[in-house]
Amino acid sequence: MSTNTMRRAATGVIGLAVAGTLTLTGCKSGNEEVAPAQSSAPAAQPSTPEGYGSAQPSTGASTGGGGAAAPSGGTAKAGQTFKIGEAAQFPFKSGSTTGDITLTVTAVEQGQASDLDALKLGDKVKGMVPYFVRYTVKNVGTTDLSFSSVGHVKGTLSDGSEAQEVSVIGDYAKCPHESLPKGFTNGKTQTGCAIALAPSAQTKVAGAMYWGDPFGLAQGKALYWK
């Protein structure tokens, strides 16, 4: 695929729920390859969902492994769970840029299989149902975060395990995700979106998680929404 085509076309990459492992790739040009599968089983998050929040409200913010109520305000802790629409504040790092942001998962919307057609993933997503995880980022620190990238948002299934994800390179109107704009100073906000895949219509994407620095994918190390 040429550089010019890459700039115009959306490219889809499907990741299995294993940290750092890509199992399927798809390009809008139709050139698709299947990467070898790992012998180990996919890593799953605890049954306390890492969640792209679906329609199941929680009773309040809590730690991932227990029911202790999270304090209002302050810095979010690894393993903490939030309601959909509730903001988590934490120190943010993108390359050499550091600051403080709040991240709010605002919705998890079920899509249609046809929503993935533009990504040319073909049979690799046959039977799967896409969900769109909507979120908002706000700069609450003193650092200009211009052009930083806030990614590391994943969907979670009803049992708390990680949903497969589709990373898009290029423009994809159904679920836009861009770097923070120029002049992203204190008080500025931007919306973003991540694509999660349910394995079938019988399984729902029921929550969301953020696993970027200073958090992680290991059990109880991310932030969760449900």
Image: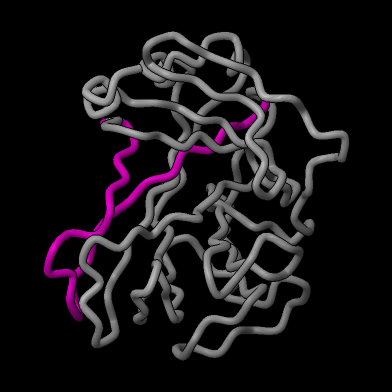
Q: Residue furthest left?
A: 183
Left or right for 34, reference 92: right
Q: How did the renderer colour the structure?
A: one colour
Q: Is residue 41 above or below residue 145?
A: above
Residue lying at 24% horizontally and 29% vertically, measured from the top left: 7
State yes or no: residue 142 in magenta: no
Dividing the picture into quadrants, the one containing residue 69 is bottom right
Dividing the picture into quadrants, the one containing residue 218 is bottom right
Boundaries of the magenta span: 173-199
Tell me the chief SS of the magenta region: loop
Q: Is residue 31 above or below residue 160?
A: above
Please provide percent x and percent y for residue 70: 60, 84
Q: Residue furthest front?
A: 2
Residue lying at 78% horizontally and 56% vertically, measured from the top left: 47
Q: Is residue 25 above or below residue 181?
A: above
Q: Nearer the viewer, residue 2 or 58?
A: 2
Please provide percent x and percent y for residue 106: 39, 56
Q: Nearer the viewer, residue 76 or 66?
A: 76
State yes or no: residue 197 in magenta: yes
